Amino acid sequence: MTTAMTATEKVLARASGRAQVRPGETVYPDPELVIVHDGYVASSKAQLDELGIPKLFDQKRVVFATDHAVVYTTPQQVARGTAIRQAVREWGVENFFDVGQGGHGHLFPMEMGMVSPGSFLFANDVHCTNNGAVGAVAMRTGTEIICVLATGTMWVEVPPTIRITLEGNLQPGVLGRDLGYRLARDFTNGTYGVDWDYRVLEFAGAALDGLDLATRIAICNTVTEIGVANLFFPPSDKIIADARRRAQKPFTPVYSDANAHYEAELRIDLNRLGPQVVMPGAPDQAVEIGEAVGRKVDHAFIGSCGSGMYEDLELTAEILRGRKVAPGTRLFIVPGTTASAQRIVETGLMRVFQDAGAIVLPAGCGPCTRGNMAPLAPGEVSISTAATNIAGRMGAKDADIYLASPATVACSAIEGRITDPRGFGGLFHREAA
Amino acid sequence: MTETSTHLRGRCHKFGHEMHMDTKVMPYKYIHLHGFDAEKLVPHLFEDVAPGFHERAQPGDFIVAGRNFAFGKAHSQGLIAIASLKQRLLCESMPFNSYRGAISRGIVCHRRCTGITDLVNDGDTIEMDFATGVFTNVTTGATAQFDPVQRDLLDMMLVGGMRPMLAKWRDEHIRAA
């Protein structure tokens, strides 16, 4: 007889051919998909060649994404691109998204229906937690991706789950990232009094129905860096309906049993949450925006894996429409996927960004990978929706990187200083949808 | 290093709680200076808390630490140095990603040895049977029963980590075919 399980436990059990799994057990799940980003393809090929392992476990289930270096800016990146294409040919990988195709590997598989509610997948990169936004479970492999590519699996310890019930609603000018930043801070500073290391954070509560996919992605993305195993949103009717339209194969959404065991339970009142700004140095250093307002900003960027959905770009355009980026500040917009990049042209948002003096970069990671694009100079100040803000993340090690929501970043770029979006141009006085 | 037994004996190097990965285990500056070069990383292992550790450590010795060993960003350089010095690791707790990295690099380790720092002194000779969880301080006679390490993970540690494990898989699945 099986006992009640959380959604993550159910997905892992199903992928492992087991009726039941419990936190702490080791399983070897069979993935529907394996996502490898451009930084790991060539190195994985070299290592597997060295080991004398010539074939992938199943080249049809492997996706190669090009997102970290989409505009080669060094000779090494050009050479790596050549090595990636060679690996694609030798391995016979069909789902290869080269430069200019697909976009961010943490987004386009969901948008294209390769990942659906209930999916289990492996990916090399830590921000694969994004997939929890659609109700899928993606486990990060790091360098052990070679084990998955060769054998089709690797050991996974079933993580314990913490349930976070969201009450109330996000207030005008307060977005998913603000909630994520606050959660990251309050886990690591001990406010919640629970261990977060390798835990799944599963969301619940009446507020969920009002959270669209972009908001869910932003929340998953912002909490990841503190070392949680995963985040999971039970898919709403809307998310399932959208996923059905896109799905490349049938899927079955997974929900936690009503009497599933949670290691801890937290309740968060969204009505009381204001915009957050993450101070430079680490992604868990959030403060109320009032503590950071006024700081001069040289560099701003919105988009990439955590806030690069079309809805994020639409909100950004709403703020930028008819306004100009401040003199002395540069604003970069990074659509998450090539589909979103195309859509902003079709819907006229591209023109809004250009009229405002912003620069639209190709879909992918943008400046958030050691400043491959649009880097920072020593002593400069940036505010962005980057995945993390450790020193040197966007170039110069002594540049200050603040993190905030797309609304806060857009308002700050217009003012040239960190700016509270509430009350900015009367944009966020209305009730949140 | 391939171990043939799950019952291992060695000398104890005792460390405290909260050994931060980027400061106390391997200072962050060496990550950029030396990348993944084990030979260059080894002299800097624990250099701020136990200078000269690499000269004292003998292959097969045990690093015994308290709670939250190697916490912080799960950089691998400290683990690369520990593996290169052929140290085993017993700690009261460590973040999962560091544990995963340790296993992947073939460090024979146990991360749930609650209270072990109360049972050892620096330099004691200790024994641990990773398959049964039985711990013995040979010098003082103290003993403890911890959980056994799961067999498949223990096998990966003993064979030397993920790459040797993959080589074994290759021999069984490709060369044998």
Image (cartoon, coloured by chain):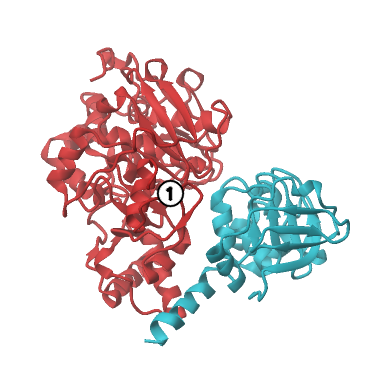
Relative height, residue A297 to residue A108 (above, below):
above
Kindly identify the residue that appears in the image at 63 percent across and 58 percent down: B148
Chain coloured red: A
Kindly identify the residue that appears in the image at 42 percent across and 68 percent down: A146
Tell me how many marks there are.
1
Query: At label 1, which amino acid type do we have?
Result: Gly
- Specify few, some or many for label 1: CA neighbours under 10 Å numbering under 14, 14-19, or 20 or more: some
Kindly identify the residue that appears in the image at 39 percent across and 26 percent down: A165
Question: Front-most of A383 and A130?
Answer: A130
Q: Is residue A129 left or right of residue A33?
A: right
Residue A404 in sight here: no
Chain of the residue that carries numbered disc 1 in the rendered image: A
Question: Which picture quadrant has residue B72?
Answer: top right
Q: Is residue A312 left or right of residue A149?
A: left
Chain coloured cyan: B
**Residue pushed farthest bottom?**
B176
Quarter the C terminus of chain A occupies: top left
Residue A295 in sight here: yes
Q: Which residue is mark 1?
A: A371
Question: Front-most of A408 and B68?
Answer: B68
Kindly identify the residue that appears in the image at 36 percent across and 67 percent down: A152
Question: Percent from the top left, x then y, of residue B23?
Answer: 68, 47
Question: Which picture quadrant has residue A220?
Answer: top left
